[in-house]
Amino acid sequence: MLGYQAVLAALLPALRQGALEHGVASIAVVTSTAAHMVGVGAAGYNAAKFAERAVTEVLRLELNGEPIRVIEVAPGMVHTEEFSMVRFGGDQARADSVYQNVVNPLTAEDVAGVIVNALNQPAHVNLDRIIMMPVAQAAPHVLTRGALKIRQ
């Protein structure tokens, strides 16, 4: 968390200058649905993401009145091999099982697209908090594996 705060403190003068020159500056922070909803076995990750969310909310309050948008993007299940491999200490089978039979988990490109969309809003629009999940996911711990139900 200290690293996050140090980077923000170091960049804030440049952001303020950019806001003066361009009318608005933006800070986009990627947290996780784990910053908003807890899950079994994820206490450390939840704590870290809740703290990141708290710092982001405080930053938004402290910058109120300045033309600097603070945007939080909180993705749910994103299929990235690196995250699961680290999470399971390099155990490929366990990492693969996270995404097994999940129809269309999010991708890094999906998250990037949402960030770009948020940044491209008119200067007076701030997409304060965006929680995004694949359709197969209702909460960090509620996930449909296999075909999605289609109601007629």
Image: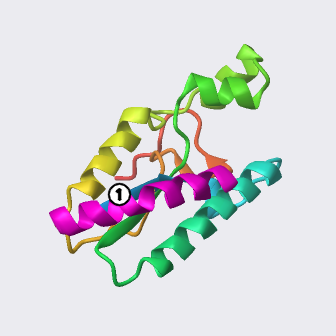
Q: Secondary structure at mark 1?
A: helix
Looking at the rendered structure, the number of numbered marks drawn on it comes to 1
Q: Main secondary structure of the magenta part?
A: helix
Residue 137 visible in this rendered orientation of the protein: yes
Residue 89 is left or right of residue 22, and the answer is right
Q: Quadrant of residue 57?
A: bottom right
Q: Which residue is mark 1?
A: 14
Residue 121 drawn at (x, y percent): 20, 62
Quadrant holding the N terminus: bottom right
Please say whether residue 99 is one of the residues in the magenta stretch.
Answer: no
Residue 139 visible in this rendered orientation of the protein: no
Residue 67 drawn at (x, y percent): 28, 74
Q: Nearer the viewer, residue 53 or 101?
A: 53
Residue 110 is left or right of residue 73, and the answer is left
Residue density around tag 1, few if under 14, some if 14–19, many if 20 or more, within 10 Å: few
| Residue drawn at the location 77% of the way across and 27% of the way down | 88
Residue 36 drawn at (x, y percent): 62, 64
| Residue drawn at the location 36% of the way across and 41% of the way down | 112
Query: As shown in the figure, which amino acid type bears the numbered disc 1?
Result: Ala
Residue 62 is left or right of residue 6, and the answer is left
Q: Nearer the viewer, residue 80 or 54?
A: 54
Residue 107 drawn at (x, y percent): 43, 33
| Residue drawn at the location 49% of the way across and 80% of the way down | 61
| Residue drawn at the location 40% of the way across and 82% of the way down | 64
Q: In the image, is residue 69 above or below residue 52?
A: below
Q: Quadrant of residue 73?
A: bottom left
The range drawn in magenta is 2-24
Residue lying farthest top? 92
Q: Nearer the viewer, residue 121 or 59?
A: 59
Q: In the image, is residue 141 above or below residue 20?
A: above
Q: How is the image coloured?
A: rainbow
